Amino acid sequence: MTIKTMHPDMRFLLDAREKAGPPGTDVAGLTLEGMIMFRAAYPGAEDTEDAYAMPIKAKDLGRLPPALVHTAEPDPIRDDGREYAARLAQAVVWVTYREARGMIHGFLRARLAGPGAKAEFDAICRFLGEHLDGPVGRT
């Protein structure tokens, strides 16, 4: 088993307004409206202490499988990914933190259109291939 965290924002609306800026503002590919929509779709959206919805809230991360925490450089939720990766490391979980330089939030949607996003997608596939029972196909 392995974990690949694409959107590691563990607090979502707790500080969404500060991260995303005013309504209608696009900050590195993520708007306040988008953060609200994604947060509402999460299981346990109403419970900001639910460790299943927000793993960073868990008291013990020590029994988790190897993890890849992958963020974009200017992403408003990048720091949450850094914090989550650090907590995993402190719990002695095998963790790889990868920050996609120059990429904005949601960059994997461009994996078929740009070499930078494709390279990041390939890095995910390599990680999963190393930590799962067989090779992982690439798109």
Image: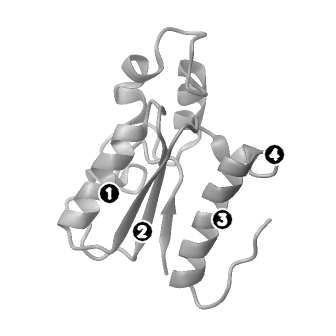
The residue that disc 4 covers is 113
Q: Residues within 10 Å of mark 2 (few under 14, many from 20)?
A: many
Residue type at numbered disc 3: Asp
Q: Kindly report which numbered mark, 2 or 4, lies closer to the viewer in this rendering.
A: 4
The answer to whether 74 is drawn above or below residue 27 in the figure is below
- Residue at 42% x, 28% y: name it: 13
N-terminal of the two: label 4 or label 1? 1
N-terminal of the two: label 2 or label 4? 2
CA separation, marks 2 and 3?
Answer: 16 Å
**Residue located farthest toward the bottom when viewing the structure as drawn:** 133
Residue 122, numbered circle? 3
- Residue at 57% x, 12% y: name it: 25
Given residues 81 and 62, the one toward you in this image is 81
Residue type at numbered disc 4: Ala
Residue 133 lies in what quarter of the image?
bottom right
- Residue at 47% x, 38% y: name it: 73
Q: Kindly report which numbered mark, 2 or 3, lies closer to the viewer in this rendering.
A: 3
Residue type at numbered disc 1: Ala
Given residues 35 and 104, the one toward you in this image is 104
Q: Residues within 10 Å of mark 1 (few under 14, many from 20)?
A: many
Q: Mark 1 near mark 2, Cβ–Cβ under 8 Å?
A: yes
In the rendering, at what x and y percent does residue 30 appear? Answer: 57, 27
In the rendering, at what x and y percent does residue 109 appear? Answer: 73, 45
Left or right, 124 with reference to 83: right
Q: Is residue 44 visible?
A: yes
